[in-house]
Amino acid sequence: MNRRIVVDSSADPFSWAGAEIGCASLKIITDQKEYVDDSKLNIKEMVRELAAYKGKSGTACPSTEDWLSAFADAEEVYCVAITSNLSGSYNAARLAAEQYMEEHPDRKALVVDSLSAGPELRLIARKIEKFIGEGLSFEEIKEKIAAYQQKTGLIFMLESMRNLANNGRVSPLVAKMAGLLGIRVVGKASDEGTLEPLEKPRGREKALDTLMAQLKKHHFNGKKVYIAHCFNPEAAEAMKQRIRAAFPDCKTTVYALGGLCSFYAEQSGLLVGFEKQ
Ligand code: X90
């Protein structure tokens, strides 16, 4: 049977080695240009152009049609979308799934609201991949993924929240803290799938210590973590070393964020997706 995992591009799927996975792309839009968040996007160039750009910039979620075409006629489709509280992507995926099953009553489509972004979507998608590999049924996967979601989390460190605030994804008051005099915002994806700022550490070292403390506080199981960064491999590597020092057996993967997450996490941002006990 043809079973397919489909994520939206906030999951940064293009750096997964060898995985056969569908993607519905988000877009980053300015008055002058539209960047499609697919495997061809030059993220470095986009971040550089946007840093120099003084006008308005925003994003758009994939349409129902974008999701449908990413389903690629599979008999079973497993979608993972960015948090429905900050994007219309999940809703578009739901509509796509309904239409798909209506048109093909023998097919099945599951849509997971990650209530998160970036590396947490990747944790969920990779778990689905594992379950498919083990030959679990659609119903079993649905149930087990709902349980797994309770055991994953996302924490982040941002040096600027300008794009989040300008696009109404956090309050301007919250955003004001970030970027001032070396102040970073360390926060987490809340249970509702919104950004929840937790602390304002001063300086990079303090920020990494704070991330580490938050991981422990949020019941990190010390087994699996994805560290994703926006052009900040040094901080990602330093975070990896801290995790390895505290949890020597942890499977730790570092990767560069894709277009959508880079737009919102901005230069130097770190997103850490982790498993809980
Ligand atoms: O539909 C759209 O246009 C996309 C809107 C996405 C807005 C949020 C993106 C967040 C990206 C920033 C830090 C971690 C956030 C945790 C979220 C719960 C990453």
Image: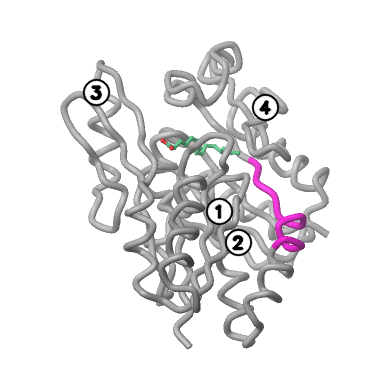
Q: Are marks 1 and 2 in contact (CB under 8 Å)?
A: yes
The residue labelled by disc 3 is 52
The residue labelled by disc 1 is 119
Q: 100 and 263: which one is in front? A: 100
Q: 247 and 31: which one is in front? A: 31
Label 3, label 2: how far apart the Cα atoms are:
34 Å
Q: Which mark is residue 197?
A: 4
**Circle nearer the viewer, 3 or 2:** 2
Q: Are marks 2 and 4 in contact (CB under 8 Å)?
A: no
Q: Residues within 10 Å of mark 2 (few under 14, many from 20)?
A: many
Q: Earlier in the sequence, mark 2 or mark 4?
A: 2
Q: Residues within 10 Å of mark 4 (few under 14, many from 20)?
A: many
Residue type at numbered disc 3: Ala
Q: Is residue 273 magenta?
A: no
Q: Are marks 1 and 3 in contact (CB under 8 Å)?
A: no
Q: Is residue 248 above or below residue 56?
A: below
- Magenta residues span 146-155
